[in-house]
Image: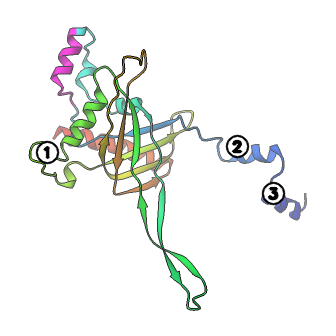
Amino acid sequence: MGLLDRITNTVNPSTIDDFKSTVSKHAGFAQSNRFNVIITPPTQSLFNLDLQNIASQALSGNFGFNDLINDPRDVALLCESCSFPGRRLNTTEYASNQDWYTTNTPTGYNTEPITFSFILTNDYYMKKFFERWIASIVDQNTYLVAHDDTYKTDVIIQALDRNNRPIYGVKLIEAFPTEITAVQLDNNATDQITKLSVTISYTDFKPEGAIASLLGGIKNQVTGSLRRLI
């Protein structure tokens, strides 16, 4: 194959083999159902301090040692869906010296909140999880707003491969929940799983490669656990 043919086939791939080769070169197709989230809010302690839930579990006969520990993996397993953040540039129209045309000039960018969907278990774990977090932001009696560093934390979202290894990640910087949606109860919803939607805002986000996301996720969990022990 000549140089011109190679260039032509690169610019205009025309066979299924070209497509398969391109996908294979980039490690296959990304799968939206393989992901992980790491959320360790400042309000969560390493130990489970929900005495009512502990008593309920003990009475039902389902209580074990693991119930005394808040495992950060529980959040990841109960997260049904979320999304990687997008980014939109702010622009303004700029008129040229000739005044016969205008161009858009970037002036900054916006970030948009992300909605997470969680499965609710019988102890309403995820609802209590975020209710405690939101209550720590605005005092429900005095309406005083807490200082930023007491309720903001980094949240990590990772895309995983088939072996559950991170292949891409995003760190949401200084994230915190801004909305917990209402939970619908319905007599007609027989055998349906109850779910909770939570909106999380953040100051900015930082894309991370596979290794950086893996190390960042480990650091985020370990640092959070140690901070809560002090």
Is the Cβ of the residue at disc 2 closer than 8 Å to that at disc 3?
no
Q: Point out the frontmost of discs 1 and 3.
A: 1
Residue ID at (21%, 29%): 47
Mark number displayed over residue 124: none
Distance, label 2 to label 1, CA atoms, is: 53 Å
> Which residue is more in the foreground, 199 or 17?
199
Q: Which residues are magenta?
A: 47-59
From the image, tell me which residue sits under label 2. 24
On the image, numbered disc 3 is attached to which residue?
Answer: 12
Circle 3 packing at 10 Å, graded few (<14), some (14-19), many (20+), is: few
201 or 34, which is in the foreground? 201
Secondary structure under tag 2 reads helix
Q: Secondary structure at mark 3?
A: loop
**Where 137 sits versus 130, above or below?**
below
Residue with the most extreme bottom position: 98
How far from the left and from the top, in percent, is residue 32?
Answer: 55, 38
Q: How is the structure coloured here?
A: rainbow
Q: Which percent across, then down, holds residue 204?
A: 38, 58
Question: Residue pushed farthest right?
Answer: 1
Q: Residues within 10 Å of mark 1 (few under 14, many from 20)?
A: few
| 55 within the magenta span | yes
**Residue 211 falls left or right of residue 2:** left
> Which residue is nearer to you in this view: 204 or 143?
143
Amino acid type, mark 1: Asp
Q: Residue 131 location, x and y as percent?
A: 24, 36
Residue under pointer 1: 139
Instruction: Determine whether label 1 and label 3 are within 8 Å by CB.
Output: no
What secondary structure is found at the residue carrying circle 1? loop
